[in-house]
Structure formats: C-alpha cells, structure tokens
Amino acid sequence: MDFDHCNALQLQMDLSTYDFHAVRYLPHTRRLLRMLAIAQLLCVAHLALARDRVLEIYVENAADPFSRPDGTGYANDVVRAAFESVGVRIKFNVVPYARCKNEVLIGEGVACVSMSPDPSFEGRIKFADTPLITVTPVYYENPARPLTAGSEAESSKGVIIGTIRGYEYTETAMKAKALGAVFEENVSDQANLKKLALRRLDAVMAMSNPPTGVEHWARDAKVANLVKVAFRNASSELGYFAVSIAHPDGPRTLKQYKAGIKSSPPTAGSIRSEPDGRLTLLM
C-alpha cells in the first residue's frame, strides 16, 4: 500500500464519517467506519516501516572509476543522488560483478550497478532508459611474447584471453570467441594483467574509459613496464542501472530511480576528474 492508496482511504473515512453522522442509526455504517479505521491504522504502520526501510543495491567491487571496492565511484554516486532526490535511503552491497549479476537474475537482489543488455536477460532484467557508463574493450599483450593478431577479427584459434567472470562483452568480442579464442575468467583486470606479465595468458581484454585512459589498468596492477596495449575493440559497450523482474520490489525501484534521474540528472558540470583519474560527482 502506497501514499496514494492511503489518501484514497482517508477520503473514504471522511465520507463514511459524514454518512455516520447523517444516518447514525444504521448499524452497517458503524461497522464500515470501524473497518476503515483499522485499515487506516494498518496503512500508517506500513508507511512508517517504508520510511525506515533501506534499499540494498548490489554494486561492483572492481570497476574504477565507476564503482570501487569502498562503494564510491561515479556510477554509484549518480545512483545514490537519484534515490536521495526522491527520498529513498540506499545501501550498497559491494561484490564481484558475477555475484552482482546473479543476485538480480535469481531475484534475490533488487538491483545491480551496472549491467549491459544481453539476450539471456530477456524477461529477467529491466534496464533504466539512459546508460551510466560507456566502456571500450582494450587488448593488452606481453611484449616478450606479442600477439600475432592486430585486431579481434584476426584473433588466432586457441589464443588465451583474460576476461572478467560474468561480464557481458561486445558482439565482436564474442565473434572472436566463436572463432576459437579462449576466454579465461578472473575476478579483475588487475589480476589478469599480473598473469599476463608472468606469461600465463596470451592477452587480456580490459574495459577502458575516457577519464582514465587505456593505460589505467596496467598502471593500477603495477605492471605498466611489463605489458602494453596491443589494439582496441572497434565498438563500445554501455552499462545501465538494472533491476530484477523476479524481485517484488524491482518495478517500484526502477520507477523511483527513473524519477530521481529525471529530477536530478548528472551533467558535465557536475563531474570532476581527479589527478589520479578518479571521477567525483559534485553534489
């Protein structure tokens, strides 16, 4: 029961009170008034609980600058601001992306930040109208054992590429996999790049973004002198605020988010790029 239902119930109470004074000798009027009074008390109790409720949203633990291990990050800041603008308190549950996605797919979690559309999500996930992030896959190689391919389309059969467990990848990347490239999943780009530096992978596909640049992940993994960028993907990928259709609060959460984004949209002037590449949403 929401505020609109409670307002409608109050109107019924007002009308019933009027009828009761007008025809107070009718027993059924008294019964109706008592029933409406009980219903209104339950409504008030429900709304009090709703005000105290904290919405838990799953966010990724290794997607700097959008979502960091401590729950900060540009995408998370946008989501928090959107819900705060409509009076909804939220709490971030920071987890690996594979779990973030799985929680909403099975209906245990209401929302995940951020996910990219995939045919397998049909009837299970609903996305916001506007994306939170834009990323472009970049391929790293070890100069001591360089790739023979100069693009995804030239990827050799059997080449082992480090990827992130659970990530959705571009259509061109999936074509390379279909042609025989092996995707070896790991928990983070940093972990993959360290394996590449040790020659335990042939390549790493990392998600780059304009604010941090293509070299960011190698610097962050502290292997910038051991690996280098081989080539970039020809296409980019968008990440959205996503909710679970199976979760009972999914539709309402998406509605609240959309209302919040509409009333408090992020703008270029509200974003600051820090010297270390971190993005800050200016509140």
Image: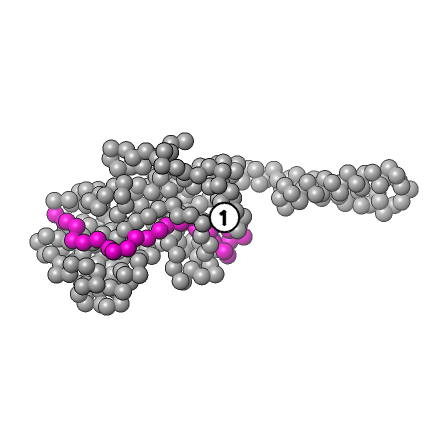
Is any part of residue 210 visible from this angle? yes
Q: Nearer the viewer, residue 187 or 114?
A: 114
Q: Specify the amino acid type for callout 1.
A: Leu
Q: Report x, y in % for residue 194.
A: 18, 49
Q: Report x, y in % for residue 7.
A: 68, 40
Q: Residues within 10 Å of mark 1 (few under 14, many from 20)?
A: many
Q: Nearer the viewer, residue 102 or 175?
A: 175
On the image, numbered disc 1 is attached to which residue?
254
Tell me if residue 6 is in the magenta stretch. Answer: no
Q: Report x, y in % for residue 66.
A: 33, 42
Could you tell whether 272 is left or right of 220 in the image?
Answer: right
Q: Give the residue displayed 50% in from the left and 48% down from the top.
A: 254
Is any part of residue 90 visible from this angle? no
Taking the view exactly as shown, the residue that stands out farthest to the left is 144
- Where does the magenta region start and end? 226-250
Q: Secondary structure at mark 1?
A: helix
Q: Give the residue displayed 55% in from the left and 37% down from the top.
A: 52
- Colour scheme of this structure image? one colour
Q: Is residue 174 above or below residue 80?
A: below
The image quarter in which residue 155 lies: bottom left
Could you tell whether 61 is left or right of 241 in the image?
Answer: left
Q: Give the residue displayed 38% in from the left and 59% down from the top.
A: 118
